Image (spheres, grey):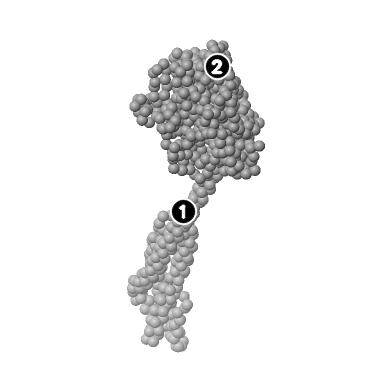
Amino acid sequence: MAKDNYFDNEDDIVTKKTVANSIKPVFSSLLSKINDQKELQAKQKHAVIDERLDTPSFPEDILELINADAYEITTDIAEKAEADVKANAEHMAQVRAKHEEEKAKAEKETHLEPVPEPKPSNAITVSANAREESSESPDVVDAIRAFSHKSGEKVTLVARNIRESAVAVAAVIEEKEKSSSKFHRALVIFFMMLVTIVVFVCVIAAFMHQMNVENDRISKFNSEAGKVCADYINSYGTPSYENLYKTYGVDGCRLTGLCFVRELDFDDDGTSELMLSYNKNGAYYNDVWGFNEKDEFSVLFSEKTAQSDKKSKDAYSTLYRRNNKYYIGVHDEKDLKKIALYQLKGDKFTKRYDCEYNSKAQSYAVDGKDDTTAFERIKYSVFKPEKAAQEADKAEKMIDGFAGKSGVSTVSTKVGRKKAYYNIVQEYNKRYGAAKYTEKNGEAYIEGLAVVDLIDFDGDGKSELFLIYRKPIKVRNEGTEEYTYYEVETYCCEIYRYTGTKAVIAYSREGISEMPDEGKDRFYILKKDGKKTYYCNNSFNIGNYGQNITATSAVYEFDGNGFTSNATASYETQYGYTEYFLDGEEVSKSEFDEKGWLVPFFDGETNSYNKSEYSVVYLQRSTKEKSSVSSQVDTTVKNIQKLNSAYSAD
């Protein structure tokens, strides 16, 4: 029994060892597969990152694979264990049978001690009751299967843990992927913003460079144009006008001096040219200035304008515009209706088209085809006084606009206000002579630079330079049928302003105020209104022995840049019929009587003005009233000495 018990215990141990030994290589294989699967998982993790998968699907695949392997493995273990038990039972039965046979034979022959039974070998063995145990092998198989089931559960638990770990790893990967995606997205956005900023900066830099180039070009053009205008003013006079009747016996006014100024891009190349029209000894000329091939500002075109010998006829220029280009017209001297249109190419004007002007229809025909919209007729003569004044003001503003606040000046050096003004006074003294009181033919007057005064016209606390000088101009002799002329001494008024570096012209006009009775009195009028001072002027043109009268009264206001008329009153009388105008608009006599006689002496009355508001300074009167004139020289000298205390009239 002891042996049987021993054998039973041994069998149990053997069975367990048998199972363990049978399972061990299988589990080793399983663990090897799990390790391989872990390595595969690590590779798949990198593959997931590289391939940027949206969800980690591989843990479920691992679990299914492990569960399938576990079922297959446990089934193999059970079947293998059952086969081993059966084989061992049969082997042990044969060994026992052989042992019993040898034992019986020995006892019979020798009566020796029974041969001990062989001990179980280290190989796989079973109990003495192998046959019985063999019949109980299904229990062993169940036990093995139960063990395998438990092992399968453990394997499944391991797989589940692996799955959970894989899910956790996948979550980490996904989070890292999101973080990586956010990082990459932020990096891309940053890069795009950086590129945008760089592009924006480059665009701004290019734009600023282009603006600087454009500003330099404009500044250069304005500077050159300003210098040219200053030279023309010195040669031909400031923009102004004169009455044609005094000189030619023709009703109306014509422009004098530098009378037309315009900036034009003749060839549409982005670079402007300067067109000037000026009155030279009674004839009008057109000049065009621009940059030549050497980038020098020079004359590109110069021609006489269209004008007839009859001063009652218009003097004018013709401009034609086509495809954003301008063409200047040259009129045939023998037939002013025929016009050759010249085009700028490079730095020269060449003939491009022929056209003809129909004076009755006031239309042009280019190469035989009518064109009523593309032509401009620039007029210089036969204006009403108010229109002539407007044209002169327009030219002055154009001249001043080239250099803005820096202006155009005959004084090029950068000096202080007093020095700039004094330089102009010296220049005018040389040109017209210093102020001098004179009596001649019953008249008392101031000749030369008669008036120098410092007046704050716009009330900004800074004075402008007010000048009046006397010079001779030609006037037609009305008493003869032929066009003969004589010289008449005329007062001219000019006002300069200071820009901060130099003095520039703000106002210029031939003639100062006079009486409507064709008397000899000449004077200037200033109006005071608070801090501001206004320059006033009355002019009368009387012709045809008093049958035709044109009278104009204007009040000029300084805006810090130039003078413009803020009130104009005029009337025209022809053979007893009178028309009245206020600021260019025709009005009734009653309205004119109410608003048109505001400036002193315009109505011919000498004692009906408000002396606290208006001041009247005489420069020429009868010698009987010379006391009102003679003191002006001392006043002029004192005002010049305000600019330079060392000045002396001697």
Q: State which tag comes first along the sequence, 2 or 1.
A: 1
Q: Is residue 291 above or below residue 77?
A: above
Residue contact between numbered discs 2 and 1, judged by CB atoms under 8 Å: no
Q: CA distance from mark 2 to mark 1?
A: 94 Å
Residue type at mark 1? Arg
Q: Nearer the viewer, mark 2 or mark 1?
A: 2
Q: What residue appears at the point 43 percent right and 59 percent down from the top-left corner? A: 174
Decide which of 271, 230 is in the foreground and name it: 230
Q: What residue appears at the point 57 percent right and 24 percent down from the top-left corner? A: 441
Horizontal relation, residue 233 to residue 22: left or right: right
Decide which of 510, 538 is in the foreground and name it: 538
The N terminus, quarter of image? bottom left
Q: What residue appears at the point 47 percent right and 78 percent down from the top-left corner? A: 121
Q: Secondary structure at mark 2?
A: loop
Whether residue 505 is visible to the viewer of this picture, yes or no, is no
Residue type at mark 2? Asn
Residue 600 position within the rendered picture, expressed as x and y whole percent measured from the top left? 44, 32
- The residue indicated by pointer 1 is 185
Residue 480 position within the rendered picture, expressed as x and y whole percent measured from the top left? 54, 12
Q: Is residue 247 above or below residue 220?
A: above
Classed neighbour count for the residue bearing mark 2: other residues with Cα under 10 Å, few (<14), some (14–19), many (≥20): some
Task: Specify the label residue 477 is tagged with.
Answer: 2
Q: What residue appears at the point 43 percent right and 70 percent down from the top-left corner? A: 23
Q: Secondary structure at mark 1?
A: helix
Residue 354 position within the rendered picture, expressed as x and y whole percent measured from the top left? 54, 15
For residue 278, which quarter of the picture?
A: top right
Q: Is residue 609 above or below residue 355?
A: below
